[in-house]
Amino acid sequence: MNPKLMSEIVASMPDEIAKGIQKTGLREGGVWMTVDRDLLPKIAGHIHNSWGAALVSMHAVDNRFITSDFKLCVVLALKGQDDFVTLVASVDAKDPVFPSLTSEIFCANWYEREIHDMFGLRAKGHPDLRPLVLYDDWPEAAFPLRKDFPVDAKVPRVPRPYVFREVEGEGIFVVPVGPVHAGVIEPGHFRFSVAGEPIIDLEIRLGYAHKGIEKLSERLDYAKGVHLAERISGDNGFAHSLAYCQAIEALSSVSVPDRARYLRCVFAELERVHTHLGDVGGIALDTAFTIGAQHAFILRERMMDVNDLLTGSRFLRGVNCIGGVRKDIDEEGRSKLIERLVMVKLDYQEFYDDVTSTPSVMDRLETTGVLSCEAASDLNIVGPAGRASGVDRDVRRDHPYAGYRNLSFKVPVLRQGDVNARFQVKSEEIMESISIIEQAISNIPEGELRARVPVPAPGKTAMSLVESPRGELVHWIVAGDGSPFRHKIRDASFHNWRAMEVAVLGDIVPDFPLVNKSFGLSYAGNDL
Amino acid sequence: MGKGVVTERYPNIPYVPHDGIHGAPSFNMDKCRSDKTCEEICPTDAIHIEPDQLCIDLGLCIFCGDCALACPHHAVTMTNEFELASKRRKGLVRVHAIKQ
Amino acid sequence: MNDLLLALIQAALILGLAPLVTGIIRKVKALLQSRRGPPVLQPYYDLRKLFRKSSVISSDASWITSVTPFVCMIAMMVAALLVPVFITASFGSLGDLIVVVYLFATARFFMALAALDAGSTFGGMGSSREMMISAIIEPAILLSIFSAALIAGTTDLAGISQVLVLGGTDLLRPTLFLAFAAFFIATLAENARIPFDNPATHLELTMIHEAMLLEYSGKQLALMEMASMTKLMLCITIAWSAFFPFGMATELSPLPVAVGLIAFLVKLLLFALAIALIESSMAKMRLFRLPNLLTGSFILAFLAVMSFYIL
């Protein structure tokens, strides 16, 4: 990042805001600004609104045993540039409140609720401070991510009511769905307020799959942490472990060998292909077009089989390691991979034509679950769901990592925002991913598979963004003594679940599962 | 349509996994020197080394293959054995006697 | 006496073959999806499994929940007595085709009430959707039956099939084809098939028929499932007997009866195949587009009646 940009950002702020900036500096990740706690919302809001920066993460770090305070971090990604702005504010341990950013940056809503749950820092002026993941019988003053909360603490069960939004009116019914569903799927609670069939309001309550991963990560060696990262959200395991490994590699300032970077691209795109195939099959299945759905699932199985063949794991587990990859693709593997990709490409075209030429299916997909472009950009929706509603962001292109700098690919962006648009975006991405894999595998340079990475020194911070099949995910790590001091994970689903509440309004209840499937979100990735 | 049935006839026809899949780890006790490398590296504490035996709990094992990579004597290999179900929890624990 | 005996034999045949038809439809759908699918006799195994299980009933439910499985099953069994299968005789003195239609309606009425009984939201939604569909499909069914009755001069199903079989190809009029088409769509609607409802779905928010069964378990679920399968079988049998009964025996002697049985089995298979093909080739329609399709069925039935007078 050029220093000029940093001074431009500071200069563009009005004086009453700019006086809150205490310190600025440039690091590899971009601009770091230490700011005054009370002016943090205005500064962050200014950068978000005037510079079109997307909110990447907002989290707290418990620094009480080092600097007697909590640190509040807000990370923003500047539009159109491979640069980030990180704002750090200090929150005194004796006065654990901070002014809420939600009025300036709408997307900060759930982040602040999570900070309150995990650290006990209250966001003053937040419209809705109900607990996000710890509720029902979690006691009020127990904050798991604080350093003085032991991992194996036994917490007493204290019943707490959780109040849902109420919609009143004649003929309005409340339909609570979940967390136990009629099918075998992940737990999540959806509270509809309906007037007959049309949905008037939807409130989503998640957190049932909360496993305390961030806390667990603080006591695992870096090498073991790769395995933990793979299991945050099972089908995006490679993307999560890639982000984790890249963050550790950045902490030690080690660059990964070229061959490993290309292989990482190949495997990441393989993961994208099979996840998207599952998603489009699921969309067809939820409209009861089972023949089409089975076709897509058969293709997904073929792709997972080739994953198994190349790496020994259908979900590409055990492939990433700190410093590179553990598995190589030899000549035989390469030819089998190319053969399989050609078959999938042709077969997928057949599936796509099948679906788009069946009027009953297209009738269900079009104009259902519309997410307007405005809502998508306000809520910072990421991934294919965002790209189907006009949000032109793709981490592979905007903040290139691994081998993506040397590969060319298109990023499909549509504006209709309905289920059909998301289906189209995912279909095009499947084709693009196949082309990326073919490019990478034909131009792969010879070399080592992994570099030796020394254990990072405590105190340094690094962040890594990866475009998982669901969208942009972030791992932000502060190095501790042999294990992370603070490991912030933000899956793409954390942003995108909010899109569901907006997209279903006006649709009828039977269309909800279709909209849900078209977003293809992860419950476990959201809850951590 | 018209693709024919793709369902495999497992278990009537056995499924042959690809080479190199991460199945159950096997321990060659002739090469083992009980230096506890595998026990320390295992992310889920699935391996326990006692004075006279080595126990691996397949119920805790996540088949990551770290033990096979880490063992300095190449005593651990990841086989492609995947049919590991047992009717009792005890049945998932495998015990290997340590040769002195 | 003869009639009663024949009716009992035919009813036993209907009840006995009903799970098989469901099994065949599932098998064909699976093969079209490139899957091997469950064995054709799987519905029998499922029923046997369910009959052995105890059931759990919500403490908020009333007597309606306990009574409904029996009402549904008995309604289907009585209807089975009134429908001729391979010979043009049934226990007609008990009731005619209109009684059959209203036996179905009684079963549906109790199912809808039972769904509301436990106070669960999915049951309520299922009931309201079912009532919306049945409100439009009932007149369509009645009209299509009336068109066959007009040709035969009686509403007794045995009588209709007798007249049509004896009349032979002379009585093959457009009326029958139009009414059959209307009745085919009605069959799909009554029995919760695609495009109206997906019988294999796990999505509780989209269910119509399945939602009304969500509260049942064990033996009562077995009865409800059996009643649904029997209803499908009855609809298929009525479709053939009322509109194209050719091949049915008119007298009780070995050769015609044998021919009648074989003809029935072939027609059963054809109908099941048609249902499976239609289910596989399209998606479930949007809920509020269903009345359009149902009205189409009504119009076909109406045209059938009109064409009797005009043509």
Image (tube, grey):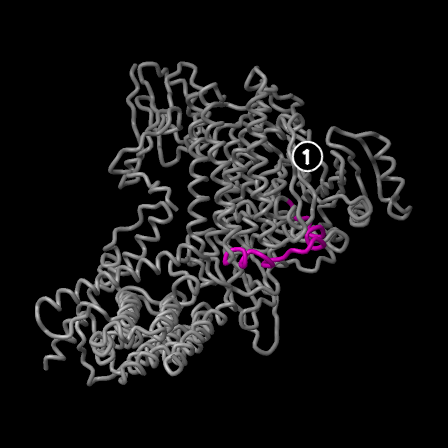
Say what amino acid the circle numbered 1 marks.
Arg
- Image quarter for residue A7? top right
Protein chain holding label 1: A
Seen from the viewer's position, the closer of residues B29 and B68 is B68
Q: Residue at x 79, y 47 (%)?
A: A40
> Under tag 1, what secondary structure?
helix
Query: Can you say whether A126 is above or below A270 in the image?
Result: below
> Does A51 sit left or right of C252 as displayed?
right
Q: In the rendered image, is residue A466 in sight?
A: yes
- Image quarter for residue C274? bottom left
Give the magenta range: A360-382
Query: Can you say whether C198 is above or below C88 in the image?
Result: above
Residue C94 image position (x, y, % from top left): 21, 84
The tally of labels here is: 1
Residue A474 image position (x, y, % from top left): 63, 38
Residue C85 image position (x, y, % from top left): 20, 71
Residue placed under numbered mark 1 in the picture: A397
In the rendered image, residue A368 lying in the magenta stretch gets the answer yes
